[in-house]
């Protein structure tokens, strides 16, 4: 199995003139985990989106290394799984259709049984043929986990991982987190004191509000 | 390529269920064609008028429907999941394919309605007309797709689309009007060689340029 590293150096993000954070640096080498914390609006979700490759940076850089080679920014999606409050799946398709679609668009081969199995893992097998429109917010959160795991990612990015989940759902997430923590790369953005144990290290974004360019 | 096809497939099934674009398109075609029909009535207009009006209807129906591909993803917030499962090039190609199918479908309906409703609208050189029709649709689909990607990120989606689309689509529409006129009077393709050349170059240039800039537009 290839070695995977996430290298973040001097990352900076500003929306128009408003600085969110500056000078964020850390390196994670598989297996590793980090917790990102900070007040509301400190930029946790922003950092997670940047690491997922869907938001541009305003300075500094970050990259994923697989083996000895740097992963192209357009191909980050192949190795990461993201669960975030900003993630919205397709309401007009059923749970099964969503996952089926994602595997097809990703170009990975998944049999129906494999998708059923994934749905079973997140406790949605019984509801597989229901439109997502009819799902509760907790069920939608479970679907996000299924969509984040369908391609067996090496890096899992979780923003507010347990929001809307019941005890059973939290247990699933806990197990998943332990697995990624000890075998792969895990990044968790959270404000819950009880989630801080999920990371080998912790970074508080409140400390990165100072503009280094002034 | 296969991945782009599945994005197209997603949009297509989505469209069948949600009708983001199709209803607006069909309504527009029905309303504008009946207005023109009332206005012209049984009078015989010149080739200029017929050709011009046909492509004006096409232009505005493209305006009313083709922006939905990206705007609906952006409005519903599903663009995030899309960028998490696909390479930007495939996203563009999938959306382009969807708009291409949509524009072919709608424009074929418009052309058939024109041919049946207006007795003065007679095509004599079919080769010329069909070739222009195909090249024109490709050009309109390409431009509409990239413009839709741009405006999906803007705050004033509704008004911006026609404003941006008009100058960008103008060359295609003008060439299409010229070629249609020439096909109506039965001239051979060689008479409108330069117009065809412009159409073809437009398609190639727009498609290449779009593929190159889409990356930048797509990422916030
Ligand atoms: N698309 C955006 N445009 C402008 N400002 C934004 C945008 N997204 C986030 N922000 C700002 O960036 C800051 C960080 O937001 P966020 O990352 O969501 O914080 P957190 O997740 O830590 O609560 C906030 O001040 C927010 O207003
Ligand atoms: Mg947040």
Image: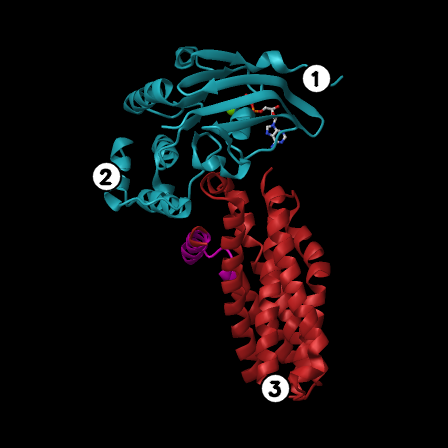
Share a chain, discs 1 and 2?
A: yes
How crowded pointer 1 is (Cα within 10 Å; few <14, some 14-19, many 20+) is rated as few
Mark 3, residue position: B125
**Front one among B126 and B164:** B126
| Residue depicted at x 36% and y 31% | A145
Q: CA distance from mark 1 to mark 2?
A: 51 Å
| Residue depicted at x 56% and y 74% | B110
Using the image, name the chain to which the residue with label 1 belongs: A
Color theme of the render: by chain
Q: Which chain is red?
A: B
| Residue depicted at x 26% and y 31% | A121
| Residue depicted at x 43% and y 10% | A193
Under circle 3, the secondary element is loop
Mark 2, residue position: A126
Viewport quadrant of the C terminus of chain B: top right
How crowded pointer 3 is (Cα within 10 Å; few <14, some 14-19, many 20+) is rated as some
Image side of residue B71 versus residue A16, left or right: left
Share a chain, discs 2 and 3?
A: no
Q: Position of residue B173 (x, y in %)?
A: 68, 69
Under circle 1, the secondary element is loop
Magenta stretch: give its range: B4-23
Q: What's the colour of chain A in the image?
A: cyan
């Amino acid at each position: 199995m290839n070695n995977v590293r996430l290298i973040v150096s001097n990352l900076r993000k500003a929306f128009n003139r408003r600085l969110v954070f500056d000078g964020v640096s850390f390196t994670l080498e598989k297996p590793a985990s980090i917790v990102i914390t900070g007040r509301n609006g400190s930029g946790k979700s922003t950092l997670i989106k940047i690491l997922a490759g869907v938001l541009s940076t305003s300075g500094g850089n970050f990259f994923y290394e697989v083996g000895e080679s740097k992963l192209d920014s357009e191909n980050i999606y192949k190795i990461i799984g993201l669960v975030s409050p900003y993630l919205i799946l397709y309401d007009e398709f059923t749970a099964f259709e969503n996952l089926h679609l994602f595997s097809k668009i990703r170009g990975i081969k998944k049999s129906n049984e494999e998708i059923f199995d994934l749905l079973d893992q997140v406790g949605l097998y019984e509801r597989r043929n229901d439109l997502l429109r009819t799902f509760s917010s907790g069920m939608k959160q479970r679907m996000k986990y299924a969509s984040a795991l369908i391609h067996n990612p090496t890096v899992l990015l979780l923003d507010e991982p347990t929001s809307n989940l019941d005890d059973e759902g939290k247990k699933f997430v806990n197990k998943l987190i332990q697995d990624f923590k000890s075998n792969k790369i895990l990044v968790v953005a959270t404000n819950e004191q009880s989630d801080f144990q999920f990371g080998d290290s912790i970074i508080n974004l409140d400390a990165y509000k100072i503009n280094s360019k002034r | 390529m296969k991945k782009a096809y599945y994005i197209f497939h997603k949009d297509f099934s989505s469209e069948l269920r949600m009708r983001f674009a199709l209803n607006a398109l069909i309504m527009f075609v029905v309303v504008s064609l009946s207005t023109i029909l009332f206005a012209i009535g049984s009078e015989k207009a010149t080739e200029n008028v017929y050709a011009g009006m046909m492509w004006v209807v096409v232009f505005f129906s493209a305006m009313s429907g083709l922006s939905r591909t990206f705007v609906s993803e952006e409005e519903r917030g599903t663009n995030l999941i899309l960028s998490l499962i696909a390479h930007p090039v495939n996203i563009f190609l999938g959306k382009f394919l969807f708009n291409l199918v949509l524009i072919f479908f709608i424009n074929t309906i418009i052309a058939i309605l024109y041919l049946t409703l207006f007795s003065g609208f007679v095509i004599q050189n079919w080769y010329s007309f069909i070739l222009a029709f195909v090249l024109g649709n490709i050009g309109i689909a390409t431009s509409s797709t990239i413009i839709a990607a741009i405006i999906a990120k803007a705050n004033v989606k509704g008004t911006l689309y026609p404003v941006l689309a008009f100058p960008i689509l103008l060359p295609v529409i003008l060439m299409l009007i010229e070629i249609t006129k020439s096909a109506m009077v039965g001239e051979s393709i060689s008479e409108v060689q330069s117009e065809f050349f412009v159409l073809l170059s437009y398609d190639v240039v727009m498609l290449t340029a779009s593929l190159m800039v889409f990356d930048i537009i797509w990422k916030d």
